[in-house]
Image (cartoon, grey):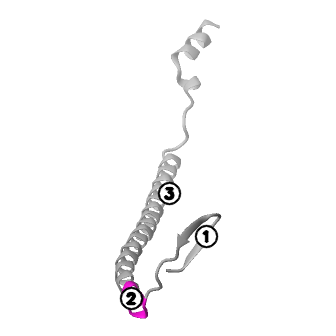
Amino acid sequence: VICEKIGDIPIAKPPIPIDNQIETTITSNETLNIDQERRLLHEIIDKEDKKLWRQRIRQRHQAERKKLKEERKKLSQSNGPKISLKENSSDSNIADESD
C-alpha cells in the first residue's frame, strides 16, 4: 500500500483498478446515463412543445380578438351618429322652458 502524508497523518491511496474493471464501470454508467439523458431529452422536448403550443394559442386568440374589435368598430360606425345625453336629457328641456 502506497501512503501519502498530509501533515503528520498518513493517507492511503486507493488501489489502481485493472483495465477490465474500468470498462465495466463505464459501460454500466453509460446505460444509466442513456436512460437519464433520454428522460431529460423528453422533458426538454415536452417543455419546448408546450411553449410553441402556447405561442400558437396566444396568436390565435389575438387574431380572434382583433377580428371582434374590428367588427365592433364597423357596427358602431354603421349605427349612425351617437346622440349625446345632454341633448335628450329631461333636465335640459325643463331649463329651456323656464327661460
Q: Position of residue 72 (x, y in %)?
A: 47, 50
Residue 93 in the image: above or below residue 71: above
Q: SS at mark 1?
A: strand
Q: Amino acid at mark 2?
A: Gln
How busy is the neighbourhood of tag 2: few (under 14 within 10 Å), some, or many (20 plus)? few
**Which disc, if any, is residue 21?**
2
Q: Nearer the viewer, mark 1 or mark 3?
A: 1
The residue closer to the viewer here, 55 or 2, is 2
Please tell me whether the stretch drawn in magenta is mainly helix, strand or loop.
helix
Say which quarter of the image contains residue 99. top right
Whole-angstrom CA distance, mark 1 to mark 3, is: 76 Å
Question: What residue is rendered at 53% in x and 48% in y?
Answer: 77
The residue closer to the viewer here, 68 or 2, is 2
How busy is the neighbourhood of tag 3: few (under 14 within 10 Å), some, or many (20 plus)? few
Q: Magenta stretch: residue 20 in it?
A: yes
Q: Give the residue number, with chain letter if any, for mark 1.
A: 5
Residue 4 in the image: above or below residue 9: below
Q: Does the residue at mark 2 contact the one at mark 1 (Cβ under 8 Å)?
A: no
Q: Position of residue 45 (x, y in %)?
A: 41, 73
Q: Give the residue number, with chain letter if any, for mark 3.
A: 66
Q: Does the residue at mark 1 contact the one at mark 3 (Cβ under 8 Å)?
A: no
Q: Position of residue 51 (x, y in %)?
A: 45, 65
The residue closer to the viewer here, 78 or 42, is 42
**Which numbered disc, 1 or 3, marks the residue that appears first in the sequence?**
1
**Which numbered disc, 2 or 3, marks the residue that appears first in the sequence?**
2
- Segment tinted magenta in the rendering: 18-25
**Which numbered disc, 2 or 1, marks the residue that appears first in the sequence?**
1
Q: SS at mark 3?
A: helix
Q: Amino acid at mark 3?
A: Lys
Say which quarter of the image contains residue 10. bottom right
Question: What residue is rendered at 44% in x and 67% in y?
Answer: 56
Whole-angstrom CA distance, mark 2 to mark 3, is: 67 Å
